[in-house]
Amino acid sequence: MSDAAIPAPQAVDAPQRSLWGDVWRQFRMHRGAMVGMVIFGLILFAVIFGPALYGVDPQFIDPRARNALPSWAHPMGTDNIGRDIFAQILQGGRVSLAVGITAMLLALFLGTLIGVLAGYFRTLDGFLMRTTDLFLALPILPLLLVIIMLFRDTLRAMFGPETGIFLLIVFIIGITSWMQTARIVRGDVLALKEREFVLAAKSIGTPPSRIITRHILPNVLSPIMVSATLGVANAIITESALSFLGLGFPSDFPTWGRLLFDGANFMTLTPARVIWPGLAISLTVLSVNYIGDGLRDALDPRIRGR
Amino acid sequence: MFAFTLRRLLYAVPTLLVISFIIFALLDLSPGDPTANLPLTIPADVREQIRISLGLGEPFVIRYLLWLQQFFINEPLNILERMTGWTIGDSENRMRVISWQTRSPVVDLIAERMPQTLWVVGMSYVVGILIAIPVGVICAYKQYSLFDQFGTLFAMIGFSVPTFFTGLVLIVIFSVNLGWLPSIYDTNLRVTSFETFWLQVKQMIMPVMVLALANAAQIASFMRASMLDNLSQDYVRTARAKGMKERTVLLVHVLRNSLIPVVTVIALGIPSIFSGAIITEQIFRVNGLGQLLITGIQGADLPLVQTLTFIFAFLIVAFNLIADLVYGILDPRIRYE
Amino acid sequence: MKLRHILAGAAAAAMLAPSAQAERGSDGQVNILYWQAISIMNPFLSSGTKDIEAASLVIEPLARFNETGDLVPFIAESIPTLENGGISKDLMSITWKVKPGILWADGTPVTAADAVFTWQYCTHPEGGCAQSPYFGDVTSVEAVDPSTVKVTFGVPKPYPYTAFVGAQSPVIQAAQFANCLGTAAPSCTEANTKPIGTGPFVVTDFKANDVVLLEANPNYRDPEKPAFASLVLKGGGDAASAAQAVLSTGEYDYAWNAQVEPEILEQMATGGKGEVISAFGTLVERIHVNQTDPDPSLGDMRSTDAHTHPFLTDVNVVKALSLAIDRPILVETGYGASGQATCNLVPAPEVSASPNNDWCLTQDLDEANRLLDEAGWVMGSDGVREKDGRRLSILYQTSVNSVRQGAQALIKQWWNEIGVEVELRSIDAAVFFGGDPGSPDTLQKFFADVEMYANNFEGSDAEKYLGDWVCEEFPSPADGWQGGNTSRYCDPAYETLHARMAETSGIEERGAIAIELNDMIVNSAAIIPLIHRGRVSTKSTTLGGVLLNSWDSELWNVADWYRID
């Protein structure tokens, strides 16, 4: 019998692993998503702090400096009446991104609400799914125009012209983009509902509202987050398209789509007027899509850690 | 299966009714008097008569029913007559939906514009599918390779870059600077010889490519995702273990199974052919249904907008149903009760 | 009309004959692009310029104005005057003789009965004719014999060249339109889209809001014309792409109304495929100032004479607004060589152009500020003037058009500098100019404080045009918002003077009264004239014979166009 001390088991010196840590690690491995995040971050920073740092008023007209080429005074040149293009892009970015994010939040909220209700409560399912079909069939364009016709004056009186149109466009994009999220969430909720931990919660008498908020929602977070990123992309493109058709914000209110619309005629003279807003839209949407892609991979337990 | 179809059809009818109600209500609520577009020198009592015949004196419900009759009974009969050349019923006196801008029946306008849309947008859909499926298959097969990276990048770009941007850029490059391709679509071009055929091809290339890129991007990513799902299945391993040629495994087994969800996506996308890629038609001046809708909206031509909107909505509902049915038929694992 | 004007017109007409010995149809096809698409070929049922001009390819009036503003006979044999007895001594009737041997496109002869029928068609109480003002004061039109038309007026008309003169008042074939009187007018689709006329072309195919296909009229009175066998009149798109199609890519031979920034046109023209043509007529881009109150809270009474505008009826305020505008910059950024700053409503012809109003041609911000200070508008801390608790805030609307939006942005900035708060609105052109009583955005309804657009008059006599400014012509809900007095200007002294013009004959005398009337309007608070605009269109360098006409339809002499080899 030896009296040699059995060496104490070595404390395992590995860092604590949490779910979100794992997600972040997997996300980091997706090169496109990382690049997308950096680019999107840059764009966000530029549009939020840019106008304050750059200081030139996007609306200021200097007719003597029309159609100028890029220079120190005007990094992207000027348009045909002398407004600085760089300032317009920064300002326009604010509006476009604001519309994108707000509309996405609205769509997300509606989609999640309807998806969860439809998935969890059997009785509501049929009705809510038919409503989803209905909304899928509604075309955006005529809807938007009629609503603008009906509510423009009231909104203008209440909120002022720009905020009024902003609310209108956000509302329209929001109520026409929630259907995809609703379907996906409903699918996941239907599957989750049958899991043991939910059954256990039910059996101890947890009210449905608590079950939904405490158990179901955190688990459907992943498709919701993916939907969120794609929703921003979709909203930005829709707003640009509406501005391009002349149905968006008024003419003195720059958004990226509007700038593209105004610059289209001057393409051969000042290609900058088309390239920069077009690039801005494309880069933003591209980076957001890559982030969404990366998130989807990172949140999928089958891929994570592979 | 049959019961499922029947049930969905039964669901579709109230859905369509509700959609038509919403469209009617929205457009009815907008400010405007339908007799406002008639010449001003028409005396007030004649106007009143016209209003009554349109059911305007009646409560909302009666007006809606009259409108329903016009849209569901009169107009389809008119369309049928135009297509087949028969005369059905009291065709002369049947009230037609007249466009306010052109004073001619809306159905005639739509019939005129339909070929353009079908040609350009339909062709772009087909080209998009033809590009997307091989790209998706190869990307999935060689996952993480250079081709895959490029393929995904291409798909992402197709999603993200708006069609109006690509359209404009293409016009500047190919039409204005190089002069290879025309920038205005000639609706009168009749393909009678090789030369006119070649002209038709030239004027269709740009709008078709712009739309095809966007379509291809979407379908390619679906194809890739679906292939990836299938490639990791057990039956593929079995097939390989049995010594089947890689090509057979891929093209005969995996591809067929992967195509199923892709087919449903394609079917769901067909109504978008008819909403006609509105913006692209604007840029290239293809006189299709999308452009018709825009001119109708801009000119506040309510009957035209109502008819077109309802047609698009109807197509979406119909193709939703078809997509579900096709999915059920193609995939033996799905059995609807 | 003085004899020398007639002779000048005849000489001009003779000079129009092309030097090339082209035969009919020898030059193939000509392609024309109107970026507002054609919806109907009957000018009596449409007041859109594009429809009127398209129709002028097919149907013609008795006489029309040429590019210098002189009358030229078309269906008529010659221009009736007092000297040749065509106009009666008491100025109450005018007699036209139809050209002998002139045929409709279907081979039947043109007779005076067709003119009589046209009058009945357009004055039918239920027909809704858009050009009925052209038959104003006409009590009867009779066919004295098959080739003589006598138009009788109810009052002496010193200027009787209204009915059947100009593109707005062509003669239609009685046989074709026989069943289209009254309420049946809009539903005669065949006649409305393929009218039978005396013009150089006939319609072979009509696709509404898209394209019109025409071919040479086999029964056209000049066997050598038109030089083109077929014509394609395509519609759609916008001004810039239309100009591009002619100047850069050469796909079209002629494009109407290139209302695009001048630097773009210049750049496009460097390719050498086309050129920009312009002609000054009477087109003036102006800002109408609403003399009534457009406040939405007034509901049905908005922009009616029930309420006057709270501050825009003050002449000093409007003068200040006008002085703050730097018109030469507007010209430079929007019109280039095809625009001139102006302070007049009637800029041409010379005999009617007032020399008295130059005060607004240079920008004077100090004077503008002074005027507003004197009027009691105190500059607030946020840069916006106030008076009696009301902010000097203006809603400024116009149609969607990039040149106009540029002008709006510039004017907004200048007005901001004198302490006026400006909100801009742009409305789609089809709606703004559409005149639909159901839409709140038409220029007639004027639910804004100021609105900007351009207007002109046909022919060279300003009486009818100035007649729009009488109190009776207010657009109001009672008459479906029709009426030419957009600003809602009302001055009894103006009415008296205008009535006098209706009784005055002689070009110089009428011109002097026109100048007086013009001065009354532009020095009131109802209008801010901006730019005298020329018509600008683009044509291919291979297209010859084009004489841009700003007094009538641009396609007025399409019979004389030919291909330059």
Image (tube, coloured by chain):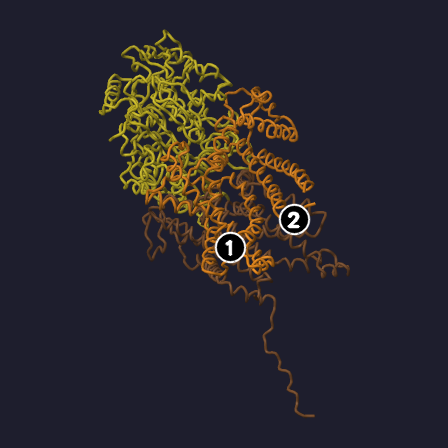
Residue C318: x percent and y percent?
Answer: 40, 38
Seen from this angle, which residue lies furthest front? B243
Question: Which residue is located at x 43 percent, y 13 percent?
Answer: C175
Q: Which mark is residue B247?
A: 1
Binning the other alpha carbons within 10 Å of mark 2 as few (below 14), some (14 to 19) or many (20 upward) gives few
Question: Which residue is located at x 32 percent, y 37 percent?
Answer: C250
Between the residue at mark 2 and the residue at mark 1, the CA separation in whole angstroms equals: 27 Å
**Quick one: B41 or C305, which is closer to the camera?**
B41
Residue A172: x percent and y percent?
Answer: 56, 45
Q: Quadrant of the C terminus of chain C?
A: top left
Quarter assignment of residue B168: top left
Chain B, colour shown = orange
Q: Amino acid at mark 2?
A: Ile
Judging by colour alone, the chain drawn in yellow in this rendered image is C
Q: Is residue B259 above or below residue C186?
A: below
Q: Is residue C542 above or below residue A107?
A: above
Question: Which residue is located at x 33 percent, y 42 percent?
Answer: B179
In the image, taking residue A57 as reference, residue B100 lies left or right, namely right
Q: Is residue C136 above or below residue C339?
A: above
In the image, taking residue C91 as reference, residue A98 lies left or right, namely right
Q: Is residue A83 visible?
A: yes
In the image, taking residue B143 as reference, residue B194 lies left or right, namely left
Chain A, colour shown = brown
Using the image, name the chain to which the residue with label 1 belongs. B
Badge 1 marks a residue whose secondary structure is: helix
**Quick one: B138 or C329, which is closer to the camera?**
B138
Q: Is residue C526 visible?
A: no
In the image, taking residue C95 as reference, residue B120 lies left or right, namely right
Residue B248: x percent and y percent?
Answer: 53, 54
Using the image, name the chain to which the residue with label 2 belongs. B
Q: Return the residue at label 2.
A: B334
Residue B11: x percent and y percent?
Answer: 67, 39
